[in-house]
Image: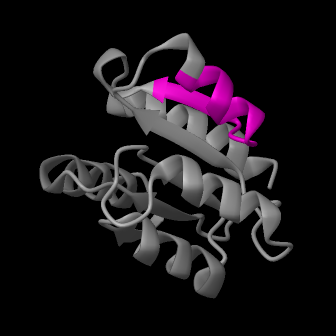
Amino acid sequence: MLKNTPVTVLVIEDDAFLQRAYQAKFKKEGFIVVAATDGESGLKLAREGKPNIILLDLMLPKISGFDVLEALMKDKATADVPVIILSNLGQESDRVRGTDLGAKEYIVKANSSLDEIVKKVRKYAASS
């Protein structure tokens, strides 16, 4: 990726408040933000727009985050897009399942600031 090319972040999050907060923060930081409020539309946007990185909630309408992640990793067009799970499911079994399915990171929303999330996105977007 070229140094000055804007990074496109796909945020798949059904909570309207968090969705707006992520969009505002990432836009302020110079990212292009694409948003989906359910798993089905998130998967469609990922396949159509090939974002540089995906932030994925797990508890989503229509298709769960785990199922979205599995579909992304099986699809040659999206398998190389880094995915960071952002969830309030903090159980170890959920973390293991997410990373086993291919997520680069598993972040518990309640334990992380927006600045920390931006830092993680920069880390993985730079290597994509």
Can the viewer see residue 112 in this picture?
Answer: yes
Seen from the viewer's position, the closer of residues 15 and 29 is 15
Seen from the viewer's position, the closer of residues 40 and 78 is 40
Vertical position of residue 59 compared to residue 27: above or below: above
Magenta includes 17?
A: no
**Which residue is most to the bottom?**
48
Query: Going by the image, does 62 lie left or right of 121?
Result: left
Q: Residue at x 60, y 64 (%)?
A: 7
Query: Going by the image, does 9 lie left or right of 126?
Result: left
Query: Going by the image, does 2 lie left or right of 46?
Result: right
Q: Which image quarter is the N terminus in?
A: bottom right
Q: How is the image coloured?
A: one colour
Q: Which image quarter is the C terminus in?
A: bottom right
Quadrant hosting residue 74: bottom right
**Which residue is most to the left?**
17
Query: Going by the image, does 41 lie left or right of 82?
Result: left
Vertical position of residue 82 compared to residue 44: above or below: above
Q: x, y (%) of residue 71?
A: 68, 64
Can the viewer see residue 1 in this picture?
Answer: no
Quadrant hosting residue 106: top right
Q: x, y (%) of residue 14?
A: 26, 56
Q: Residue at x 57, y 55 (%)?
A: 67
Magenta includes 99?
A: yes
Quadrant hosting residue 104: top right
The range drawn in magenta is 94-107
Q: x, y (%) of residue 91?
A: 47, 14
